[in-house]
Image (cartoon, rainbow, N blue to C red):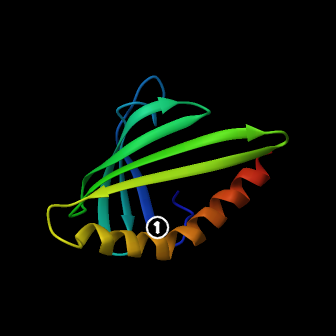
Amino acid sequence: MAEWPGVQSVRLVRDGAPERNGLGAIRRVKLLGLTLDEEVVRWDPPHRFDYVIIKGLPVRHLGKLELTEEGDETTLTWRITLASRVPLLAALVLWRLRAGLPAALAVAATRMKSHS
């Protein structure tokens, strides 16, 4: 993730289990002038992991990443659920995410291809 466009740094704040980046891990992500803490709330390698942003965003953010094998290809499905009590705030955050995610996913795809 640290190689993704706009990400300045990623640091493990709390180890997860059974792996360091597994269930319960908290990572501090610095990107685009923001500092976010995300916690891993589901860990099922190599198929799925879910996280919540617990600090740094004015909305509730739940991300679910799932990898599915299809023949000799792998499909990544990344679902993000946003909620806010402030009208239109979640829509604004979603707009910003949609602007940056294509470049981030391109980097992830390149890394996945290099590891296959």
Report whether residue 6 is seen: no
Q: What residue is rendered at 40% in x and 75% in y?
A: 96
From this view, report whether residue 70 is shown above or below residue 81.
Answer: above
Residue 100 location, x and y as percent? 49, 73
Please state which amino acid type lies under the numbered disc 1. Answer: Val
Q: What residue is rendered at 48% in x and 51% in y?
A: 79
Residue 87 location, x and y as percent? 17, 71
Q: Which residue is mark 1?
A: 7
Neighbour class for label 1 at 10 Å: few (<14), some, many (≥20)? some
Residue 114 location, x and y as percent? 78, 53
- The quarter of the rendered structure image containing the C terminus is top right
Q: Nearer the viewer, residue 42 or 34?
A: 42
Q: Is residue 78 left or right of residue 109?
A: left
Q: Is residue 112 left or right of residue 40?
A: right
The local secondary structure at tag 1 comes to strand
From this view, report whether residue 116 is shown above or below residue 94.
Answer: above
Q: What residue is rendered at 57% in x and 66% in y?
A: 104
Could you say which quadrant of the image residue 14 lies in?
Answer: top left
Could you say which quadrant of the image residue 89 lies in?
Answer: bottom left
Seen as rendered, the residue at the extreme right is 72
From this view, report whether residue 111 is shown above or below residue 32.
Answer: above
Residue 106 location, x and y as percent? 66, 66
Seen as rendered, the residue at the extreme top is 18
